[in-house]
Image: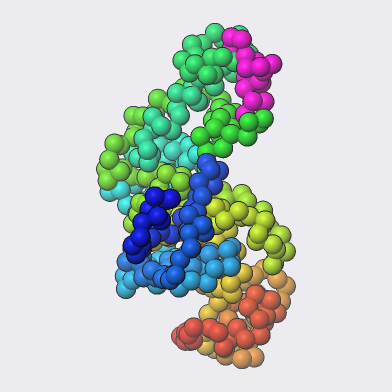
Amino acid sequence: MDILMSKQCAKILVGDPHQHIYSFRGAINNFDMIPHTHNYYLTQSFRFGPEIAYVGATILEVGKRVRETLVGGGQRGSVPEQDTEMWHRFRTGVGGADGRLAVLSRTNFSIFNEAVRLINPENTSCIHIIGGFEAFGLSTIHAIWALKQRDFGLNLQIEDPFILRFNKGGVGNLKGYDGLCQYAKITEEQEDGLSWKIAVVEKYGERIPDLLKRIPLRHQTSQHDADFILSTVHKANGLEFDTVVIIDDFKALQALLAKEHGGNQSLVEDDEWNLLYMAVTQAKRTLFMTRTITDILARAGECFLRSKLTTVSAESPAPQCSKGCSNPVNTDTRLSMHRLPITYVDGREQGGAVCLACVHKMAGHLAFLMSPGIERVPLP
């Protein structure tokens, strides 16, 4: 960078600071360090439509207080109402071998869990792990499992030289499987560390040898031949997929959103918001929502409320609020607010009519004016 900036000529630097996700490895954002005369924003994306663009922009606005326009293309996208075929694929683990459905997560542990679920013995689905299953650390997982078996008197072969040290002389005063677990906590290993592999061994126990054989057998070299593409957001950086399922394992964001509305977003590092932003914007056509994303959108005022003109006969009992409160929906007026149904990967919220008290709590007294359109519900 020093050599580049020393040149006596006009310089144009292009990049996206919202894709800065490697601070934990010492990466820095050079855009913050370089004096410039002009700043231009590339706002048009030709990857996805306006719905996905809105979700991505809202994540930046809520999480980083950045209000930059992100405009999607003219293609149709799907956020609250997902493609039922893709939803059924993910839920059942029966795919189409066309490389269209990607499952992205914050952690390797979640990706391993999804791999186990999707390649169960009852189906023939294949997966593709971005970066290859060799780089996923399967041999290290087996070595950790073998080390744990030593505690039960089984003298299994350990091929990983680092894990083997805990069986022989130990590392410092740490020896055996318990010593390895302590080492992982002390060193606070992260993305390429031991903690998630130890968690896999703890969760799957005696199933580990079978699972570690099955994953390579069901793994496709080309992602276009796989039923499901699996990756952490870090490794999927720069890629794009027809349909994206995001695993809701962004713990730092979940902890923040669990606090009262209006909590301090500065408690979460920018890299965490950038990761979720990148996961969302990898989708070209369909994005499966998570409850964390729904909470983020709610902070920006998007509660998936729409106005509807309805007619309810006087004899009919007033419907109950779909938010689960004890209030009935006001039927004295033909204009009422309804929540749109939202399909999550782990279930579906049906939506329905919302009482005035909940409407005011969710979106304020101007909710009816902010509604993008009025839908007429036909008479029964």
**Image position of 216 with respect to 226: above or below:** above
User: On the picture, is 360 further left or further right than 52?
Assistant: right
Colour scheme of the rendered structure: rainbow
What residue is rendered at 58% in x and 81% in y? 337
**Image position of 54 with respect to 264: above or below:** below
**Image position of 281 with respect to 338: above or below:** above
Q: Quadrant of residue 357?
A: bottom right
Q: Nearer the viewer, residue 56 or 156?
A: 56
Q: Which residues are magenta?
A: 167-184
Q: Nearer the viewer, residue 63 or 83?
A: 63
Label tally? 0
User: On the picture, is 355 further left or further right than 118?
Assistant: right
| Residue 170 shown in magenta | yes
Q: Examine the rendering and report whether any part of residue 338 can be seen.
A: yes
**Residue 325 coordinates in the image, percent (x, y):** 70, 71
What residue is rendered at 63% in x and 55% in y? 268
**Residue 238 coordinates in the image, percent (x, y):** 37, 52
What residue is rendered at 54% in x and 18% in y? 163
Q: Examine the rendering and report whether any part of residue 85 can be seen.
A: no
